[in-house]
Image (tube, rainbow, N blue to C red):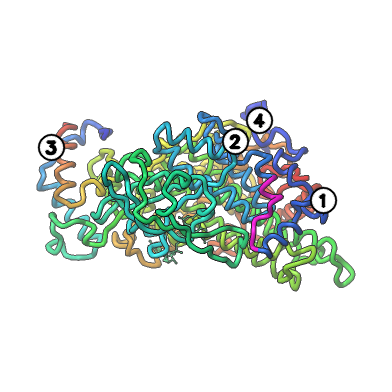
Amino acid sequence: MTTSAPESTAQVVSSEEIRDMLLNLVASYLEQPVTDIRSDVKLLDYGLDSIFALTLCGDVEDEYGIEVKSTLAWDYPTIDAITGFLHEALSERV
Amino acid sequence: MTVTENLSRQPAERRGPLADLDTPDTLEALFGDPDDLANPVGHQAFVDADERGDFLPAGRKVLEAYGIGAEFVPRALGGRLGQADDLARVLRTVFRHDGALGLGHGAINLIASSTVWAAGGADQQRWLASVLLDNRPTAGAITELAYGDDLARTRLRATERDGDIVLDGRKEVINNVARAHAITVLARTSEEPGSRSHTLFLVDPATVPRDRLRFLPRYHTSGMRGTHLGGVEFLDCPLPVSAAIGEYGDAMETILRCFQVTKSVASGATLGLLDTMLRTVTGFGVQRRLYGRTVAELPHAEAELAGAFTDLLICDAMTTTACRALHVLPRQTSVYAAATKYLVPEIEQGAADRLAVLLGARSFLREGPHGAFQKHFRDLPVAALAHSGATVCLATIIPQLPRLARKSWFVSSAPDPALFRLGQTLPDLDFGRLQANAGPDDQVMATLLDVGQEVQSDPVLRELCERLVGELRALTVGWRGLSPRNRTPFAGPVGFELAERYAVVLAAAACLGMWWHNQDHPNPFMRDTAWLISALDRLTTRLGYDPLPGAGDAARHVFTELLTRHAEHRAFDLVGRRLF
Ligand SMILES: Cc1cc2nc3c(=O)[nH]c(=O)nc-3n(C[C@H](O)[C@H](O)[C@H](O)COP(=O)(O)OP(=O)(O)OC[C@H]3O[C@@H](n4cnc5c(N)ncnc54)[C@H](O)[C@@H]3O)c2cc1C
């Protein structure tokens, strides 16, 4: 992946913050309370399949100002997996 | 408005499709005069073959003589595939004469081969190139009857066993599959649900054990009756491991990228069907006399004919822009290709329906001088569905548009003019640069604002552009306000409606770009504002506006050009080259 964010936005983001952001995002897509979403369940099991992955990757790019592969949610199928990937990517950037 | 200033910005040398409008191109010349009853590849011969439910052998010979297969092979591999819009125009010629040939011996080769050019190994590419350069048919066995466009649920399985790949399962409604010398097959290579569980394989049917491969009975269709739609069943069929196209698990991504090419090119190709329908009905209109004048002289008929011609120009602006964007804006074409594959068949079908009304009783006849109309009329909806239908195309862009609304519209800058300049050669198609989804940089849409600025001195164009910019503003608000759920596979009708409106505004932007950046077009009609005014007026009408009173004069110019092109046997597209 490439990092393309301006210096100023590059700051440490904790795994917890990333996971919360993703949980809220997925809850909003599904119009369900965030407490109903589990970070270790596959997004596919919530009915969010390939096309959704494209949406998610755009939202992640805009949220953190980085570029990610559009297939992010294909390769990292749960919120926990995406969190791990993003945490590492964002830490590298700093 | 004056365009001299713009003209001075154009390159002096005229190349590409605008270089010669007065002699038919090689392929068109091989087809000759379609109305000549003695022509073995004239309309009558194709209508007869269609009635028999078969390809016209003489038609296939024409394509072989021309060497159609080379059109699908990248230049680097010894073929002629360089620019997507060039390929679309070649295939348009075939569709002008026969849809079954255009799909079965044309577009299908691109569907079958593009994934190999994008992801295949050097040996696979060389082998497939040789098959196509020999003009042998190929097939792409991608969809399954049970799951249609939901490719992720593909069931045909490929497993590794004793150093072989073993295919097991069936594909149905596949063009040419029983005759193909090369078949690309989408297979499941992992039981995991999701989008990393599929791999494409390149199959040489001549080398697999005959008892492990079974062809299923042919399907007969309402239109394109000559196409050979069949099925194939692999019964624990062994393939060498080298048959995999690219990495395991990459098929969905490869397909998402390649189908941007196939959708754009196929949309541009099918315009040949509308070209012939419009030609047939215009011929009827100028010959048949009612109430002491020709049908074409009746104001309503005149408006309908001019409208259909305008529709064709709109569609060509959109498809040519989508095709050229594959070269110039490869990061964005996921949206452009799908918007085009949605809107173009929609506009074509509307135009065809109105032409059928105009042709009246003759539109139903399967024989006689207007039989070609009825045949093309049957072919059109089949051609439109064959490679992903309208709804699926909209579903592809819905998740992507909110981001364009947030990040791009009214922000992105106008594209490199090469995107629109028909005379400017583009670097060869590079499948590697295409992306599964679009970035936040809708430069085609930025053309609406960019060229919109330039037409302020023309009151009619100014008004039309204001409407379109207003619509883009409304779309921006609409998409930003859409609930996140409407950006998922569960999107409601509201998302679909906004996506439809987006496609219409995008088409308008393409028309503006094509007009402004082709002021070196040898035909003054294409440099003038009449077609552009008519096009934008039709598109804003589609958005629910009343027709602009000032656009009436423009429609008359368009009609005059239609009659001229009809009399001179010229194509009704942006280039307008002589056909025979
Ligand atoms: C002439 C012809 C030639 C063909 N040749 C080939 C070939 O060579 N190779 C090949 O692999 N296939 C081929 N096909 C198959 C073709 O690609 C499929 O028919 C096509 O993909 C549509 O599938 P379906 O009609 O089964 O619709 P489905 O995908 O089953 O869809 C059913 C309905 O649901 C709607 N729908 C689907 N997805 C969504 C969504 N996400 N959101 C909202 N609505 C949705 C659709 O619009 C449709 O109305 C051919 C078809 C034809 C007609």
Q: Chain of mark 4?
A: B
**Mark 2 or mark 1, which is nearer the start of the sequence?**
2
Spatial distance from mark 2 to mark 4, Cα to Cα?
Answer: 10 Å
Quadrant of the rendering where the N terminus of chain B is positioned = top right
Which label was assigned to residue B15?
4
Quadrant of the rendering where the C terminus of chain B is positioned = top right
Q: Is B448 in the magenta?
A: no
Q: Nearer the viewer, mark 2 or mark 4?
A: 4
Type of amino acid at the residue the image marks with label 2:
Arg
Please indicate whether residue A31 sits to the left or right of residue B170 in the image: left
Residue B507 in the image, given as x and y percentages of width and height: 54, 51
**Residue in the picture at 43% in, 49% down:** B335
Task: Provide the residue span drawn in magenta.
Answer: B53-61
Which label was assigned to residue B421?
2
Please indicate whether residue B141 sits to the left or right of residue B523 in the image: left
Q: Nearer the viewer, mark 3 or mark 2?
A: 2
Q: Chain of mark 3?
A: A
Answer whether residue B340 is visible to the viewer in this image. Answer: yes
Which label was assigned to residue A12?
3
| Mark 4 element type | loop
Q: Chain of mark 2?
A: B
Type of amino acid at the residue the image marks with label 4:
Arg
Type of amino acid at the residue the image marks with label 3:
Val
Q: Chain of mark 1?
A: B
Q: Nearer the viewer, mark 3 or mark 1?
A: 1
| Mark 2 element type | loop
